[in-house]
Image (cartoon, rainbow, N blue to C red):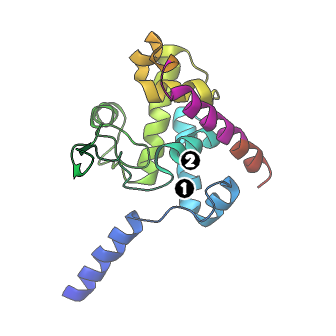
Amino acid sequence: MRSVALLTIAALLCACASSPPRDPDNLCRIFKERPKWQKAARKAQRRWGLPPEVAMAFVHRESAFVHDARPPRKKILGLVPWRRPTSAYGYAQATNEAWSDYRKEAGGWFPDRDDFADSLDFIGWYNHKSHERLGIKKSDAYRLYLAYYSGHGGYARGHWKRGPAQGYARRVADRANRYARQLSGC
């Protein structure tokens, strides 16, 4: 009986820690390989109005579909691992602060940053907030990503105008457009 319980726990843990899809550049293949991801994308779309191709392009950029992604550690003297630059974690690379806000406002029972459906719901929620606060259309992957990367206040103050944000946002928008074309032909 004890070994059955241990096997069940191990199976559940393995299910949470899935590897990235085999072809992350093709949304049809991703959804065919991971039907639960498509269901999660559609659920986030119904709840927050965010197109699945935009949400999936965000996940591709933020974590490359790695469930426990984190920013690399800084190193002291180039050798000794030190702190990470942010608390970002999971598929959506949500920071502790943003995740806490999400949980208080919209997160349900026990959302986890390394759960794909919860991460898509977070991305939908955050972009819904960008739409409400900043007037960004939910189909505008470029500006939504600038707000996601810079934060709502940083976006409003134009922090995205310096640094790598514009290049990242351009790649997210390109991928969202490619995913949309693919999705229409699935």
Q: Which residue is drawn at the image coordinates 56% and 47% (left, top)?
A: 41
Picture coordinates of residue 123, whole percent (x, y): 47, 37
Question: Mark 1 highlights which residue?
Answer: 37
The residue nearer to you, when weighing 84 against 30, is 84
Residue 158, position in %: x, y?
48, 13
Residue 42: horizontal and vertical position, in percent?
59, 46
Q: Which residues are magenta?
A: 162-177
42 falls in the magenta region: no
Q: Is label 1 in contact with label 2 (beta carbons under 8 Å)?
A: yes
Q: Residues within 10 Å of mark 1 (few under 14, many from 20)?
A: some
**Residue 9 higher or lower than 52, as above or below:** below
Instruction: Work out whether 14 lies above or below 78.
Output: below
167 is higher (above) or lower (below) than 161: below
Answer with the quarter of the image where residue 105 lies.
Answer: top left
Question: Does 29 sit above or below residue 153?
Answer: below
Q: Is residue 49 visible?
A: no
Residue at disc 1, secondary structure = helix
Q: Residues within 10 Å of mark 2 (few under 14, many from 20)?
A: many
Which residue is found at the position 28% from the left and 32% from the top?
A: 97
Q: Position of residue 136 (x, y in %)?
A: 57, 19
Disc 2 element:
helix
